[in-house]
């Protein structure tokens, strides 16, 4: 009988501490948001420019799929390496190195021309871009208490949608004025400003002069239980790693499909081109942005109200999975704007689902292991992306239709949630298992 009043008192104390604490952690979140936006401009440009590149360089659907495949292959390898590297080097240096590497690889796209050369620069881009989420999630684990992590991740992950919105607005204008090569070089070199800002601003919260003692106490109010550090190989043997990696394998390929093939779908199904598919893509990714923030906010709010992490995360995930289902019908929709709304609902569902999945490493593992676990899950997602690249390329060459592709997309999130629940029915942290 006393348990409920005690929870109410604890919640009131937490809310009071939140008001007293500073808010510098949200400045750090803004830096993560900006990096993720740039990351997605760099990776999505090839999808936006696909019709131009195919016309100029004579690529077939299979050759384009091969370029995407090797990017995903590099992303898979890069996630394993980058996750480990960022755990070892720390987020400040690790993030700066990864960002610089992928930015230079992106700019190099403007200097190449053949399919093989594009595969080489896309491979380098994939290795570098793999550092974004291991670093970002490690930073969130360091700077935010558990009750705020899903919301913070939703906010910085929303940068992906801002990047996806900016790309069809900025890149076609540069391309029409100066050519596609200039578009790659200009966007790449301009992005290096972020590295200087990151190195100047970022420190760990306990080393940062702008963090008040009250904010630091709030950030450290519910740290992940520190246990004996798990060796990297040992991470593959615990269920918590697969509770993160298997859902990533299921859902990441769907997002890659939207990024790399959505402009092509709009062009083939509704006759849009480089000048006209900007507004539909902007609407789709604005909806994605709303989904990213809302998905993280919902589970964070439920946890703040006293729900268990397990119940809050999984209820939010179920709602997101149901939101994606209607996209299965989009191939048969004749009205462009109805199709845009269905796709936007699906991408919003993906981003909301992803915001909650991305919290799992910091929910389940000590901070020292977060980057490595994120790397393993990112590799699983990238392997799924390799498979979807070949799948989409083959389906389009054989049928010319996206119907089967959208059927797979609609089902993937319920499959991911089912796998998560089977692997980890209670989302038990590794520290609890060791006790």
Image (tube, rainbow, N blue to C red):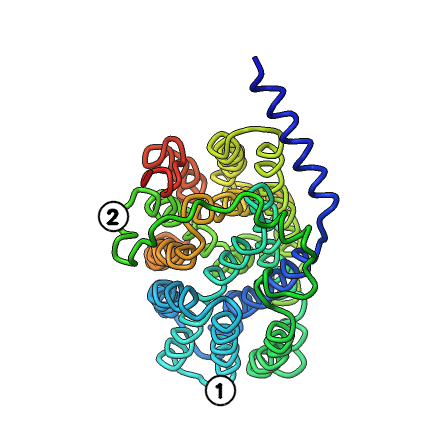
Which quadrant is the C terminus positioned in?
Answer: top left
Which quadrant is the N terminus positioned in?
Answer: top right
Q: Quadrant of the rendered structure where residue 164 is?
A: bottom right
**Distance CA(mark 1)–CA(mark 2):** 44 Å
Disc 1 versus disc 2: nearer the observer: 2
Taking the image as shown, residue 142 lies to the left or right of residue 71, namely: right
Label 1 environment density (alpha carbons within 10 Å; few <14, some 14–19, many ≥20) = few
Q: Quadrant of the rendered structure where residue 74 is?
A: bottom left
Q: Position of residue 248 (x, y in %)?
A: 40, 49
Looking at the image, residue 396 lies above or below residue 177 = above
The residue that appears at 69% across and 31% down in the rendered structure is: 12
Q: Position of residue 71 (x, y in %)?
A: 39, 68
Would you name the residue on which mark 1 appears? 111
The residue that appears at 38% across and 59% down in the rendered structure is: 372
Please, what secondary structure does the residue beneath circle 1 have? helix
Q: Residue furthest front?
A: 213
Q: 125 or 175: nearer the eye? A: 125
Q: 19 or 298: nearer the eye? A: 19
Looking at the image, residue 427 lies above or below residue 241 = above
Would you name the residue on which mark 2 appears? 237
Q: Residue furthest right?
A: 19
């Amino acid at each position: 009988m006393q348990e409920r009043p005690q929870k109410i008192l604890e919640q009131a104390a937490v809310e009071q501490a939140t008001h007293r604490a500073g808010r510098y952690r949200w400045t750090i979140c803004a830096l993560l948001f900006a990096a993720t936006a740039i990351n997605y401009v760099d990776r999505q440009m090839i999808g936006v420019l696909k019709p131009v590149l195919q016309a100029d360089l004579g690529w077939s659907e299979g050759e384009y799929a091969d370029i995407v495949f090797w990017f995903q292959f590099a992303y898979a390898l890069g996630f394993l390496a980058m996750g480990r590297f960022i755990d070892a080097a720390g987020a400040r240096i690790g993030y700066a190195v990864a960002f610089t590497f992928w930015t230079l690889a992106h700019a190099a796209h403007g200097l190449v021309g053949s399919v093989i050369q594009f595969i080489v620069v896309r491979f380098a881009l994939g290795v570098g871009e793999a550092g974004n989420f291991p670093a970002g999630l490690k930073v969130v684990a360091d700077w935010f208490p558990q009750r705020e992590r899903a919301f913070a991740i939703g906010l910085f992950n929303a940068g992906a949608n801002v990047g996806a919105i900016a790309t069809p607005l900025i890149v076609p204008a540069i391309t029409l004025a100066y050519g596609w090569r200039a578009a790659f070089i200009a966007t790449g070199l301009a992005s290096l400003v972020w590295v200087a800002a990151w190195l100047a601003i970022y420190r760990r919260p306990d080393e940062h002069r702008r963090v008040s003692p009250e904010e630091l106490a709030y950030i450290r109010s519910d740290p992940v239980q520190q246990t004996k550090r798990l060796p990297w190989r040992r991470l593959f043997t615990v269920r918590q790693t697969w509770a993160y990696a298997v859902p990533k394998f299921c859902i990441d390929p769907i997002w890659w499909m939207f990024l790399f093939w959505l402009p092509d779908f709009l062009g083939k199904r509704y006759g849009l081109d480089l000048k006209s598919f900007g507004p539909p893509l902007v609407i789709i990714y604005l909806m994605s942005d709303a989904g990213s923030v809302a998905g993280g906010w919902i589970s964070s709010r439920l946890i703040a109200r006293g729900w268990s992490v397990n119940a809050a995360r999984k209820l939010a995930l179920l709602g997101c999975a149901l939101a994606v289902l209607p996209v299965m019908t989009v191939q048969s929709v004749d009205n462009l704007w109805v199709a845009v709304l269905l796709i936007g609902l699906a991408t919003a569902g993906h981003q909301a689902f992803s915001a909650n999945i991305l919290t799992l490493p910091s929910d389940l593992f000590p901070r020292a292991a977060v980057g490595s676990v994120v790397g393993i899950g990112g590799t699983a997602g990238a392997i799924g992306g390799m498979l979807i690249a070949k799948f989409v390329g083959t389906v389009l060459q054989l049928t010319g239709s996206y119907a089967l592709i959208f059927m797979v997309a609609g089902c993937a999130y319920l499959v991911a949630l089912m796998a998560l629940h089977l692997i980890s029915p209670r989302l038990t942290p590794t520290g609890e298992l060791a006790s």
